[in-house]
Amino acid sequence: MTIQELESKHTSGLYTKRPIAIVRGKGARVWDNDGKEYIDCVGGQGTANIGHANAAVADAIAEQARTLISLTEIFYNDKRAAVEAKLAAISPNHADRVYLCNSGTEAIEAALKFARWSTGRKKTVAMMRGFHGRTMGALSATWEPKYREPFEPLVPGFSHIPFDNLEKAREAITDETAAVIVEVVQGEGGVRPGSREFLLGLQELCRARGALLIVDEVQTGFGRTGKMFASEHFDLQADLVCVAKSIAGGLPMGAVMIGARVRKLEPMLHGSTFGGNPLACAAAIAAIDFMEKEDLPARAAELGAYALGRLQRIESPLIREVRGMGLMLGVELKQKVTPYLAALMERGVLALPAGLNVLRLLPPLVIEKSDIDTVVDTIEQVLNLSNESN
């Protein structure tokens, strides 16, 4: 029985799987069980910023696993204290408090609760095309109907406005609004960066009307966009910043960076059994240290600008627009993207969709320039072949 057959026999059925079995990775490359090599522009959907099988993180995990793996937050811990201090020091919103959890959707859930607690209000304004997770609160903030409709009614009090439309925001944010939640760059929504005017305008509206601003940096955090956090491109000072994905070099972990406008949180208001466990904290310390030592945000800025320029120079009638920030790149096509993802995979490049027609690239930030050339050349080849066949 093959790996694919065995997993298909017992898997939940929740995932549409590609037909290859990936068994090994190193840097920006992965290998399947037949030994075929791929350039990985899926990047664990944004979790592999520091590259696969990073030695510094692997060593930290191994050492901590032999020391102490699990410890709840009813006790103090050296690794937890260190990672909280590290996150506070690099936070884009000058946070002095950090809540640790296990994923991006958990970070969003916590931030939504903290906003309601802090303001005493019940309503949340979110963005069309925004994606924040699949648990019930995060799903209520997520816009896409195909994710929402099977589980309605969802948490009440959520409304959605057009992304990057400040006039609609002025109408929607009132003295009943607890929070406004936004991505600096919409990932699932098509790799769409917000404008400076819009993002800073949201911040100003929240402060004027007593609401809290939640910025979802789950995908854009930890160097992805060319800064440690995408908020830094605009000096955006959110009240609650949600992070996850690459925070711990690939281990499950999330966090909320809590700003000064958030009311003091009381014991038992929220919690997590595994949140802040020493193993994930040790991995996060090593991962963040590696990002800083290797200056991965600057590398993402440089290579991202190069990749964006090369993608924009592809001459194909199939391309509607190319956009992105750092190494978070999207090629919007005039057709559904799925066949092109399959064609790229056959040629040794793994990529993601963003919606129905956007080809999304999230390579590890350690990717080599030569690999970017190969990726762009392969995309151009696939698009040209498809156009010729049509």
Image (cartoon, grey):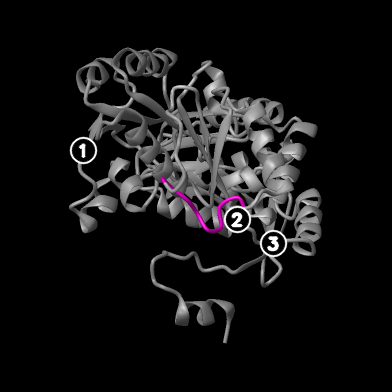
Marks 3 and 1, how far apart at CA: 39 Å
Marks 2 and 1, how far apart at CA: 47 Å
Magenta range is 269-276
Total numbered badges shown on the rendered structure: 3
Left or right? Give the position of 9 relative to 345: left
- Residue designated by label 2: 347
In the rendered structure, which amino acid carries the disc numbered 3?
A: Ile
Residue 275 percent location from the top left of the image: 56, 52
Quarter of the figure with residue 61? bottom right
- Residue designated by label 1: 157
Name the element at disc 2. loop
In the rendered structure, which amino acid carries the disc numbered 1?
A: Gly
In the rendered structure, which amino acid carries the disc numbered 2?
A: Arg
The residue lying at 39 percent from left, 48 percent from top is 133
The residue lying at 36 percent from left, 39 percent from top is 112
Kindly check if marks 3 and 1 are in contact, taking CB atoms under 8 A apart as contact. no
> What is the number of the mark on residue 69?
3
Q: In what quadrant of the picture does the N terminus appear? A: bottom right
**Mark 2 / mark 3, whichever is N-terminal:** 3
The residue lying at 71 percent from left, 68 percent from top is 35
Q: Does residue 385 appear in this view? A: no
> What is the number of the mark on residue 107?
none
Does the stretch in magenta take in 97?
Answer: no
**Mark 3 / mark 1, whichever is N-terminal:** 3
**Mark 2 / mark 1, whichever is N-terminal:** 1
Quarter of the figure with residue 345? bottom right
Mark 3: few/some/many CA within 10 Å (<14, 14-19, 20+): some
Quarter of the figure with residue 321? top left
Q: Main secondary structure of the magenta part?
A: loop
Residue 295 percent location from the top left of the image: 75, 30
Q: Does residue 65 appear in this view? A: yes
